[in-house]
Image (spheres, rainbow, N blue to C red):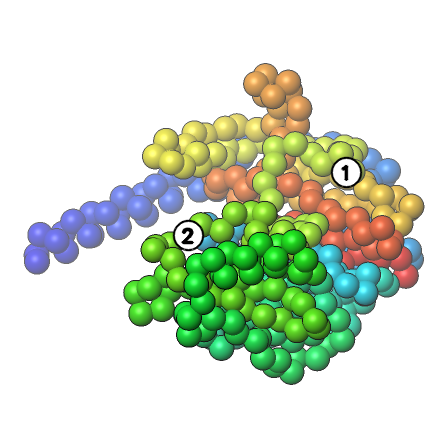
Amino acid sequence: MKKMWIWICIMLLVAVGIYVSFPAEKLIVERNDKALSANYSAFQEINERYKSDIFEVSLVARVVVSSAASPNPIRIFSSVNDQLILDCDANVDENTKFDTRYYKIDKAGSVTDSLYVAYQGYSEQFIDGFMVYTSGKDAYYNTWPLNGDTTRQRVVELNDDLSWEDERLEAKVKAVKASAKYYFFSTALKEDVWYRQVYFYADQKWYLLWQKTPGYTEVLDEDSARRYRNVVFRSGEVSFEIPKNVKLLYFHQQEKIKYYHVVGGGHGGFSVYNWRGLGFFETGIAGRVFEFMVPKLVVEKEKHNGYKPSLYTVSEPGSSTNLYHPAFYHSPNGFSFYAPQAKELFLIRIK
């Protein structure tokens, strides 16, 4: 025990020595004293404090947790009534890690309704005007996307006693695929037995057909509920290329610093000396030019990608990079969404 405490003291002394010998200031090797051009002095960061006579910027969603298990914690998909639905991970702690919050966005870009879904063993599927809650038991649906009604409506179950012959089952599945307005397959495990579930909508009702299988059966994309969800935007998307609808106008160098790229996958990382500064961009929103600024930006150009600019942010000299992707979704209805990182989503529209 005594030796362990000695080693801990030695490690602390080494850490203090490194901090004293290599403060953040020594990681800045050069500064640029050139003043910023007046052409860019009015550019602002995109956040709740953005001020404009033309545009209104508001924070519409923020999540707490973003991880490798959920790299895109905010998603947007199109829905009925010419509206969009925001799908946000509600993870705050262990008790909420599978919960979800949904928001409706109308044609004007306004939030008209929201729904918090606490995970209770169900998976909710959006099928046009319906939310179908699938499970190994007690499946149900509601019409929240269509009219805001969250009343549970029972799914009519077929062959729940497993009395149907295989020939009758296969004939029914074939008929469902040929004529049902909506259908999708799912799998369920009950008491160590696997089942294929066929959900379908006919005669203004949702049905569930049970079919016992020898083991787990993979659901093909063409038969999954995912095919009914048209996702138009995801936060946290990564790309080394600037989107075609965004233009980097100017990069103002402020200080040349040392920073790191963390490669991952057991390959470690490497250090870089490069300029950090302010990036000035523009995009189009509702036919108007929208200008914005990004601080703590570094721009790298490498031979392997044809010297196209790759964008990163570096919070402090000596820290590692975060890939910056100026991701926008421009709605045809005249408003836009912007996600500077995986955890935040901003709404931008004309006043």
Q: Earlier in the sequence, mark 2 or mark 1?
A: 2
User: Image point 33% across, 64% down: which residue?
Assistant: 193
Q: Is residue 332 left or right of residue 77?
A: right
What x and y, as percent, mark residue 22?
Answer: 41, 38
Viewer can see residue 270: yes
Residue at the spot 59% in from the left edge and 16% down from the top edge: 303
Identify the mark at residue 292; answer none if there is no mark. none
Apparent side of residue 329 relative to residue 38 in the rendered image (left or right): left
Q: Identify the residue at the far bottom of this view.
A: 151
Q: Amino acid at mark 2?
A: Thr
Q: Nearer the viewer, mark 2 or mark 1?
A: 2
Classify residue 3 as left or right of residue 16.
left
Q: Whole-percent x and y of residue 328?
A: 73, 47
Query: Which residue is the extreme one toward the left?
Result: 2
The answer, for residue 100, to whether it is visible in the render is no
Q: Quadrant of residue 275?
A: top right
Q: Name the image quarter holding the C terminus.
A: bottom right
Residue that mark 1 sits on: 246
The kind of residue on which mark 1 rests is Val
Q: Residues within 10 Å of mark 2 (few under 14, many from 20)?
A: few
Badge 1 marks a residue whose secondary structure is strand
Camera-nearest residue between 276 and 285 = 285
Task: Look at the numbered discs 2 and 1 and tell me whether their residues touch, using CB distance below 8 Å.
Answer: no
Crowd rating for badge 1 (residues with CA inside 10 Å; few <14, some 14–19, many 20+) = some
